[in-house]
Amino acid sequence: MSDQIKFIMDSLNKEPFRKNYNLITFDSLEPMQLLQVLSDVLAEIDPKQLVDIREEMPEQTAKRMLSLLGILKYKPSGNATDMSTFRQGLVIGSKPVIYPVLHWLLQRTNELKKRAYLARFLIKLEVPSEFLQDETVADTNKQDISAMEEEKDQLIKRVEHLKKRVETAQNHQWMLKIARQLRVEKEREEYLAQQKQEQKNQLFHAVQRLQRVQNQLKSMRQAAADAKPESLMKRLEEEIKFNLYMVTEKFPKELENKKKELHFLQKVVSEPAMGHSDLLELESKINEINTEINQLIEKKMMRNEPIEGKLSLYRQQASIISRKKEAKAEELQEAKEKLASLEREASVKRNQTREFDGTEVLKGDEFKRYVNKLRSKSTVFKKKHQIIAELKAEFGLLQRTEELLKQRHENIQQQLQTMEEKKGISGYSYTQEELERVSALKSEVDEMKGRTLDDMSEMVKKLYSLVSEKKSALASVIKELRQLRQKYQELTQECDEKKSQYDSCAAGLESNRSKLEQEVRRLREECLQEESRYHYTNCMIKNLEVQLRRATDEMKAYISSDQQEKRKAIREQYTKNTAEQENLGKKLREKQKVIRESHGPNMKQAKMWRDLEQLMECKKQCFLKQQSQTSIGQVIQEGGEDRLIL
């Protein structure tokens, strides 16, 4: 089961799916998500299956998938009860049911694409009864059914004819048994080749894991050998800061946003379906709230209260810095992931080169010489390959010619035997063979010693007399045989002419059919383009209607004599916002002017305070020094002089 899941995961990660799954994410898929994956795989085989299952009923999904799996000849293991279990598991998205289906589909995608394409032309279309009431549709349906029945009869006759031809052959039962055994062995060979490929993939993944672990060990040893304690501590501190930022700031914000989004979505899902009247009511409430907000802002502006506080500038700077920090953290995370992927890719490439010729990657002039050597070898290989292809083609022609000649020889021998039986001279060809055998015996007799020339001459005379008698008896038969051969040649020529006429007629019909298919395909594409253009035009009309309605509302509000209506106008709102921003800029410029004027005196005062602080520190040090000296010795003053006695 694990090998099956790995194969499914690897196939889904490749083109054209590109799912980027790992074992944990793939195993943790919900039933609906697993059904969507199965639907995507079926859509790759048959583009008509490209459906979002969230927009489809479960019964319709199961019916659609079961019908396509039936066309693709998928046979689930088990009996009738297991079939009901299979259907039920397909409806609910059971993993034990869907995993084998995905494994079977992904193994033979190209073959199933061809089968799904041909199924459109081989399956009978179910025409509704209301359409069959039309005479044209009914006649066309009858013609299609009769054509399909004729094709079926022709196939049955062809199969019976082939069976008769096989039954006339000698040991046909033994040949059928050998063919059956050959088919079984081929299937077994495919199964063993698949197992071999899976084991190669497992070995390749194991080698990759070993290589990654060895590279990690090597990098860790190098880091441990070359690193200093200071650099290690610095690196660890950077990693700790980054991880703390991710844990304490980034991840909680993302989690909170996800929770809010989830709460909002749950709220939307829990609410009942809304109609046009509900939407109009909500729009009216939104408009009322917006008008109240605008009124409150106008009142606040009339009281000359600033919209933002004094710390708004610092808050903006802090928000900008936090956004830059988040962006840099995301860039760092992406760079780490990209570095890890590049290291994995480089290790894979190194392993491939080692497996290819057992050496390291060439560089510089050595690589150029190696490329030139490969080019010369490739030209020689192409020439040899072309010669081999020509020899194979010639061998195939000669082999086919040999088979045709053998078959023609057998047919002629059978016709000759039947003609000999009709003419009553059966055994003439046998006599000819006997003559050849006798001639061979004659050569042997010539070599043998102990025979006399008289006996040999008598034997030759007898033989010549026998041959002359047979020739005289078969002269008339040979004449008839020549006439029949001439007639056979005429019939063969006529058959070739009829066959060439049939081939030309079939080619003309095939070209007409291909032209009709191309025309139908072109008309379908035009229909789709016109439909998309129609929908696009409708959307543009609706957008223009909304814009026109907004413009008329704005014009009415601007022309209206009511001051409240004028305040609702967008022009008035932008004018108010512009005036607010101009007042705010004027206040900020005044504040900047005051700060510039007081900058010099403030800096001078700060310097004076720093000098005073240094002076006080110096006095403190002097006082402490004097205290320490007093505690060590004693100062005596005599005659106006100070003496220290220890």
Image: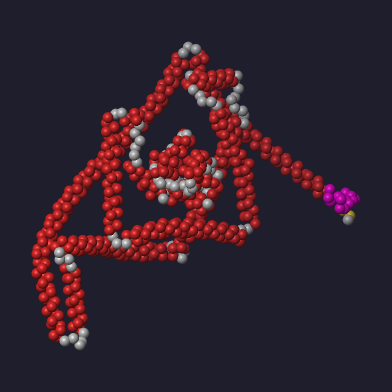
Pinpoint residue 108: horizontal percent, then vertical percent.
41, 50
Q: Identify the image quadrant of residue 183.
A: bottom left
Q: Is residue 591 above or below residue 154?
A: above
Q: Who is closer to the viewer here, 355 or 140?
A: 140
| Residue ID at (38%, 27%) | 538
Pinpoint residue 234: horizontal percent, then vertical percent.
63, 52
Q: Who is closer to the viewer here, 163 or 20?
A: 163
Residue 391 in the figure: left or right of residue 460: right
The total of numbered circles placed on residues is 0
Does residue 449 appear in this view?
A: yes
Q: Who is closer to the viewer here, 376 or 389?
A: 389
| Residue ID at (41%, 49%) | 109
Residue found at the far front of this picture: 424
Residue 61 in the figure: left or right of residue 125: right
In the image, the segment drawn in magenta is 627-641
Residue found at the far bottom of this picture: 450
Q: Who is closer to the viewer here, 640 or 362?
A: 362
| Residue ID at (20%, 87%) | 449
- In reply to whether residue 36 is colored magenta, the answer given is no
Pinpoint residue 8: horizontal percent, then vertical percent.
48, 49
